[in-house]
Amino acid sequence: MSEIRRRPGDGTGGLHSGATTFEALREQAVALRREGLSLRQIRDRLGVHNNNILNAPVKGEPPPEWTKRPRAKDALRAKARELRIEGMTYDEIQVELGCSKSSISLWVRDLPKPERRIRPVAIDTTRAQAGRREAHGRRLAEHAATRHSAAAEIGALSERELFLVGVALYWAEGAKAKPHPQIECVNSDPDMIRTFLAWLRLMGVTDDRLRFTLQIHESADIAAAEDYWEGIVGLGAAHFYKTALKRHNPRTNRRNTGIGYRGCLTVSVLQGSELHRRIEGAWCGIVGGVGSITKT
Protein backbone atom coordinates (compact mmCIF):
# COMPACT_ATOMS: atom_id res chain seq x y z
CA MET A 1 0.00 0.00 0.00
CA SER A 2 1.39 3.38 -0.92
CA GLU A 3 1.96 5.79 1.92
CA ILE A 4 -0.21 8.89 2.29
CA ARG A 5 1.97 11.92 2.74
CA ARG A 6 0.59 15.16 4.16
CA ARG A 7 1.55 18.75 3.65
CA PRO A 8 1.02 20.60 6.98
CA GLY A 9 -0.83 23.87 7.08
CA ASP A 10 -2.61 23.79 3.70
CA GLY A 11 -6.03 23.10 5.29
CA THR A 12 -6.92 20.32 2.87
CA GLY A 13 -5.39 17.36 4.58
CA GLY A 14 -2.24 17.97 2.55
CA LEU A 15 -2.53 15.06 0.14
CA HIS A 16 0.11 15.22 -2.61
CA SER A 17 -1.64 14.30 -5.81
CA GLY A 18 1.35 12.24 -6.98
CA ALA A 19 2.13 10.56 -3.66
CA THR A 20 -0.98 8.41 -3.32
CA THR A 21 -3.91 7.09 -5.30
CA PHE A 22 -7.60 7.32 -4.71
CA GLU A 23 -7.72 3.56 -4.25
CA ALA A 24 -5.11 3.66 -1.50
CA LEU A 25 -7.06 6.34 0.34
CA ARG A 26 -10.33 4.48 -0.19
CA GLU A 27 -8.85 1.22 1.13
CA GLN A 28 -7.84 2.89 4.40
CA ALA A 29 -11.03 4.92 4.76
CA VAL A 30 -13.33 1.94 4.07
CA ALA A 31 -11.43 -0.23 6.54
CA LEU A 32 -11.88 2.40 9.27
CA ARG A 33 -15.55 2.85 8.34
CA ARG A 34 -16.16 -0.89 8.71
CA GLU A 35 -14.47 -0.79 12.11
CA GLY A 36 -17.32 1.51 13.19
CA LEU A 37 -15.62 4.94 13.02
CA SER A 38 -17.52 8.13 12.22
CA LEU A 39 -16.47 10.44 9.38
CA ARG A 40 -14.90 12.81 11.90
CA GLN A 41 -12.88 9.99 13.46
CA ILE A 42 -11.72 8.81 10.01
CA ARG A 43 -10.77 12.39 9.17
CA ASP A 44 -8.66 12.73 12.30
CA ARG A 45 -7.09 9.29 11.87
CA LEU A 46 -6.01 9.93 8.26
CA GLY A 47 -5.41 13.68 8.58
CA VAL A 48 -7.71 14.43 5.63
CA HIS A 49 -9.51 17.65 6.52
CA ASN A 50 -11.21 18.36 3.19
CA ASN A 51 -14.75 16.94 3.22
CA ASN A 52 -14.85 16.57 -0.57
CA ILE A 53 -11.73 14.41 -0.46
CA LEU A 54 -12.97 12.37 2.52
CA ASN A 55 -16.55 11.71 1.42
CA ALA A 56 -15.67 10.19 -1.95
CA PRO A 57 -13.69 7.15 -0.66
CA VAL A 58 -16.43 6.07 1.80
CA LYS A 59 -19.32 6.69 -0.55
CA GLY A 60 -21.63 3.70 -0.47
CA GLU A 61 -20.38 2.48 2.90
CA PRO A 62 -23.22 2.51 5.44
CA PRO A 63 -22.57 4.61 8.57
CA PRO A 64 -22.18 2.77 11.88
CA GLU A 65 -25.36 2.28 13.86
CA TRP A 66 -24.23 4.49 16.75
CA THR A 67 -24.07 7.56 14.50
CA LYS A 68 -27.62 7.18 13.20
CA ARG A 69 -30.36 9.35 14.60
CA PRO A 70 -33.07 7.54 16.54
CA ARG A 71 -36.11 6.43 14.51
CA ALA A 72 -38.61 6.14 17.34
CA LYS A 73 -41.45 7.40 15.11
CA ASP A 74 -41.29 4.33 12.87
CA ALA A 75 -43.26 2.32 15.44
CA LEU A 76 -45.81 5.13 15.83
CA ARG A 77 -46.24 5.35 12.07
CA ALA A 78 -46.88 1.62 11.82
CA LYS A 79 -49.41 1.76 14.67
CA ALA A 80 -51.17 4.77 13.12
CA ARG A 81 -51.57 2.91 9.84
CA GLU A 82 -52.90 -0.13 11.67
CA LEU A 83 -55.52 1.99 13.46
CA ARG A 84 -56.50 3.74 10.24
CA ILE A 85 -57.06 0.41 8.52
CA GLU A 86 -59.29 -0.54 11.45
CA GLY A 87 -61.44 2.50 10.59
CA MET A 88 -60.33 5.10 13.13
CA THR A 89 -60.52 8.82 12.36
CA TYR A 90 -57.61 11.24 12.74
CA ASP A 91 -59.04 12.46 16.05
CA GLU A 92 -59.31 8.95 17.41
CA ILE A 93 -55.79 8.04 16.32
CA GLN A 94 -54.51 11.24 17.92
CA VAL A 95 -56.14 10.31 21.23
CA GLU A 96 -54.77 6.76 21.01
CA LEU A 97 -51.16 7.68 20.13
CA GLY A 98 -50.75 11.29 21.28
CA CYS A 99 -49.40 12.38 17.87
CA SER A 100 -50.29 15.51 15.98
CA LYS A 101 -52.92 15.21 13.27
CA SER A 102 -50.50 16.65 10.72
CA SER A 103 -48.11 13.73 11.34
CA ILE A 104 -50.96 11.23 11.21
CA SER A 105 -52.09 12.68 7.87
CA LEU A 106 -48.62 12.20 6.37
CA TRP A 107 -48.42 8.62 7.61
CA VAL A 108 -51.86 7.36 6.47
CA ARG A 109 -52.97 9.60 3.59
CA ASP A 110 -52.39 6.81 1.04
CA LEU A 111 -54.87 4.56 2.84
CA PRO A 112 -58.60 4.56 1.95
CA LYS A 113 -60.78 6.87 3.98
CA PRO A 114 -62.97 4.95 6.45
CA GLU A 115 -66.72 5.08 6.10
CA ARG A 116 -68.52 7.80 8.02
CA ARG A 117 -70.07 6.67 11.26
CA ILE A 118 -71.72 8.25 14.24
CA ARG A 119 -69.01 9.86 16.33
CA PRO A 120 -69.08 9.75 20.13
CA VAL A 121 -70.50 12.81 21.82
CA ALA A 122 -67.18 13.60 23.48
CA ILE A 123 -63.71 12.15 23.47
CA ASP A 124 -62.36 10.90 26.80
CA THR A 125 -60.25 13.90 27.90
CA THR A 126 -58.36 11.86 30.50
CA ARG A 127 -57.21 9.46 27.82
CA ALA A 128 -56.32 12.33 25.51
CA GLN A 129 -54.24 14.03 28.19
CA ALA A 130 -52.44 10.76 28.94
CA GLY A 131 -51.67 10.38 25.23
CA ARG A 132 -50.26 13.90 25.04
CA ARG A 133 -48.07 13.24 28.09
CA GLU A 134 -46.75 10.05 26.53
CA ALA A 135 -46.03 11.88 23.27
CA HIS A 136 -44.24 14.64 25.17
CA GLY A 137 -42.13 12.04 26.98
CA ARG A 138 -41.19 10.41 23.68
CA ARG A 139 -40.17 13.77 22.20
CA LEU A 140 -37.98 14.52 25.22
CA ALA A 141 -36.31 11.12 24.89
CA GLU A 142 -35.73 11.65 21.16
CA HIS A 143 -34.25 15.09 21.77
CA ALA A 144 -31.95 13.75 24.49
CA ALA A 145 -30.76 10.92 22.23
CA THR A 146 -30.07 13.34 19.38
CA ARG A 147 -28.09 15.69 21.67
CA HIS A 148 -26.07 12.78 23.07
CA SER A 149 -25.26 11.47 19.58
CA ALA A 150 -24.27 14.93 18.34
CA ALA A 151 -22.06 15.56 21.38
CA ALA A 152 -20.30 12.20 20.91
CA GLU A 153 -19.65 13.08 17.26
CA ILE A 154 -17.72 16.23 18.21
CA GLY A 155 -15.21 14.69 20.60
CA ALA A 156 -12.07 16.58 21.67
CA LEU A 157 -11.24 19.84 19.89
CA SER A 158 -7.83 20.59 18.46
CA GLU A 159 -6.28 24.02 19.07
CA ARG A 160 -7.02 24.97 15.47
CA GLU A 161 -10.68 24.01 15.87
CA LEU A 162 -10.97 26.00 19.09
CA PHE A 163 -9.31 28.93 17.34
CA LEU A 164 -11.89 28.88 14.52
CA VAL A 165 -14.79 28.42 16.95
CA GLY A 166 -13.61 31.39 19.01
CA VAL A 167 -13.20 33.69 16.02
CA ALA A 168 -16.71 32.90 14.78
CA LEU A 169 -18.15 33.19 18.29
CA TYR A 170 -16.58 36.59 18.83
CA TRP A 171 -17.57 37.93 15.42
CA ALA A 172 -21.19 36.98 16.19
CA GLU A 173 -21.37 38.05 19.85
CA GLY A 174 -18.44 40.39 20.54
CA ALA A 175 -18.09 44.16 20.35
CA LYS A 176 -16.88 45.55 17.03
CA ALA A 177 -17.08 49.31 17.69
CA LYS A 178 -14.75 51.56 15.70
CA PRO A 179 -12.43 53.49 15.41
CA HIS A 180 -10.96 52.12 18.67
CA PRO A 181 -12.25 48.56 19.01
CA GLN A 182 -11.91 46.75 22.31
CA ILE A 183 -12.43 43.09 23.12
CA GLU A 184 -15.80 42.67 24.87
CA CYS A 185 -18.31 39.83 24.84
CA VAL A 186 -21.61 39.72 26.75
CA ASN A 187 -23.62 36.57 27.44
CA SER A 188 -25.81 34.93 30.07
CA ASP A 189 -24.84 31.37 29.15
CA PRO A 190 -22.08 30.07 31.47
CA ASP A 191 -20.92 27.52 28.88
CA MET A 192 -20.52 30.30 26.33
CA ILE A 193 -18.42 32.28 28.82
CA ARG A 194 -16.24 29.24 29.60
CA THR A 195 -15.67 28.58 25.90
CA PHE A 196 -14.82 32.23 25.26
CA LEU A 197 -12.31 32.29 28.12
CA ALA A 198 -10.67 29.07 26.88
CA TRP A 199 -10.28 30.69 23.48
CA LEU A 200 -8.84 33.90 24.95
CA ARG A 201 -6.20 31.89 26.79
CA LEU A 202 -5.40 30.04 23.58
CA MET A 203 -4.86 33.48 22.02
CA GLY A 204 -2.34 34.32 24.74
CA VAL A 205 -4.52 36.52 26.96
CA THR A 206 -3.31 36.23 30.56
CA ASP A 207 -5.56 36.52 33.62
CA ASP A 208 -4.20 39.95 34.56
CA ARG A 209 -5.75 41.37 31.36
CA LEU A 210 -9.24 39.98 32.07
CA ARG A 211 -12.01 42.10 33.57
CA PHE A 212 -15.66 41.26 34.15
CA THR A 213 -18.85 43.27 34.65
CA LEU A 214 -22.10 41.75 35.86
CA GLN A 215 -25.30 43.30 34.47
CA ILE A 216 -28.39 42.29 36.43
CA HIS A 217 -31.83 43.56 37.43
CA GLU A 218 -31.98 45.17 40.85
CA SER A 219 -34.80 42.82 41.90
CA ALA A 220 -32.55 39.73 41.65
CA ASP A 221 -30.27 38.16 44.27
CA ILE A 222 -27.21 40.21 43.35
CA ALA A 223 -24.78 38.75 45.88
CA ALA A 224 -25.59 35.19 44.84
CA ALA A 225 -25.15 36.10 41.17
CA GLU A 226 -21.76 37.70 41.84
CA ASP A 227 -20.58 34.57 43.67
CA TYR A 228 -21.91 32.39 40.85
CA TRP A 229 -19.98 34.22 38.10
CA GLU A 230 -16.79 34.32 40.15
CA GLY A 231 -17.03 30.54 40.31
CA ILE A 232 -17.65 30.24 36.56
CA VAL A 233 -14.63 32.32 35.51
CA GLY A 234 -12.40 31.03 38.29
CA LEU A 235 -11.12 34.49 39.24
CA GLY A 236 -11.70 36.60 42.34
CA ALA A 237 -13.51 39.87 42.96
CA ALA A 238 -10.40 41.89 42.05
CA HIS A 239 -11.11 41.10 38.38
CA PHE A 240 -14.72 42.36 38.58
CA TYR A 241 -15.87 45.93 37.99
CA LYS A 242 -18.82 47.30 39.94
CA THR A 243 -22.04 45.44 39.15
CA ALA A 244 -24.33 47.34 36.77
CA LEU A 245 -27.92 47.29 38.03
CA LYS A 246 -30.94 47.50 35.75
CA ARG A 247 -33.99 49.22 37.22
CA HIS A 248 -37.16 47.20 37.52
CA ASN A 249 -40.13 48.50 35.54
CA PRO A 250 -43.23 48.14 37.77
CA ARG A 251 -45.51 48.33 34.72
CA THR A 252 -44.32 44.92 33.51
CA ASN A 253 -44.93 41.46 34.97
CA ARG A 254 -41.29 40.45 34.57
CA ARG A 255 -39.59 40.12 37.94
CA ASN A 256 -36.18 38.60 37.04
CA THR A 257 -35.95 36.90 40.41
CA GLY A 258 -36.16 33.24 39.35
CA ILE A 259 -33.67 30.65 40.57
CA GLY A 260 -31.99 30.43 37.16
CA TYR A 261 -31.67 34.18 36.62
CA ARG A 262 -28.11 35.44 37.21
CA GLY A 263 -27.89 38.34 34.78
CA CYS A 264 -25.39 38.75 31.95
CA LEU A 265 -21.60 38.81 32.23
CA THR A 266 -19.41 41.10 30.15
CA VAL A 267 -15.89 39.79 29.50
CA SER A 268 -13.38 42.54 28.67
CA VAL A 269 -9.73 42.29 27.67
CA LEU A 270 -7.33 45.08 28.57
CA GLN A 271 -5.02 46.21 25.77
CA GLY A 272 -7.07 44.27 23.24
CA SER A 273 -6.65 46.35 20.07
CA GLU A 274 -4.01 44.09 18.55
CA LEU A 275 -6.08 41.00 19.34
CA HIS A 276 -9.10 42.62 17.70
CA ARG A 277 -7.11 43.14 14.51
CA ARG A 278 -6.06 39.48 14.57
CA ILE A 279 -9.70 38.43 15.00
CA GLU A 280 -10.79 40.62 12.11
CA GLY A 281 -8.10 39.16 9.87
CA ALA A 282 -8.93 35.59 10.89
CA TRP A 283 -12.61 36.19 10.15
CA CYS A 284 -11.72 37.45 6.68
CA GLY A 285 -9.70 34.26 6.23
CA ILE A 286 -12.70 32.12 7.23
CA VAL A 287 -14.95 33.96 4.79
CA GLY A 288 -12.39 33.49 2.03
CA GLY A 289 -12.06 29.80 2.88
CA VAL A 290 -15.82 29.31 2.69
CA GLY A 291 -15.81 31.02 -0.71
CA SER A 292 -13.17 28.64 -2.01
CA ILE A 293 -15.23 25.62 -0.92
CA THR A 294 -18.39 26.81 -2.68
CA LYS A 295 -16.45 27.29 -5.92
CA THR A 296 -15.05 23.74 -6.05
Image (spheres, rainbow, N blue to C red):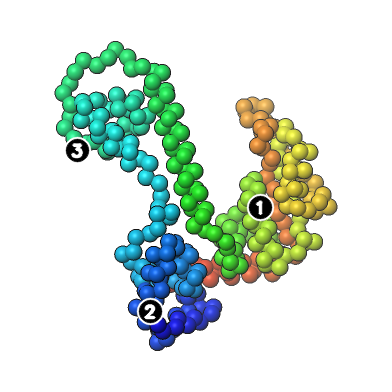
Front residue of 267 and 146? 146
Location of mark 1 (residue): 193
Marks 2 and 1, the one that precedes in the sequence: 2
The residue tagged with tag 1: helix, strand or loop?
A: helix
Relative to 205, is 140 on the left or the right?
left
> The disc labelled 3 sits on which kind of residue?
Asp
Viewer-nearest of discs 2 and 3: 2
Would you identify the image quadrant in which residue 185 lies? Answer: bottom right
Most extreme residue toward the front is 35
User: Residue 128: x percent and y percent?
Assistant: 38, 22
Relative to 65, is 152 on the left or the right?
right
Front residue of 230 and 66? 66
Residue found at x 18% / y 26%: 114
Within 10 Å of disc 3 (Cα), the crowding (few <14, some 14-19, many 20+) is few
Front residue of 8 and 87? 87
> The disc labelled 1 sits on which kind of residue?
Ile
| Residue 52 visible to an observer of this rendering | no
| Residue 120 visible to an observer of this rendering | yes
Within 10 Å of disc 1 (Cα), the crowding (few <14, some 14-19, many 20+) is many
Residue found at x 40% / y 65%: 33
Residue found at x 66% / y 54%: 194
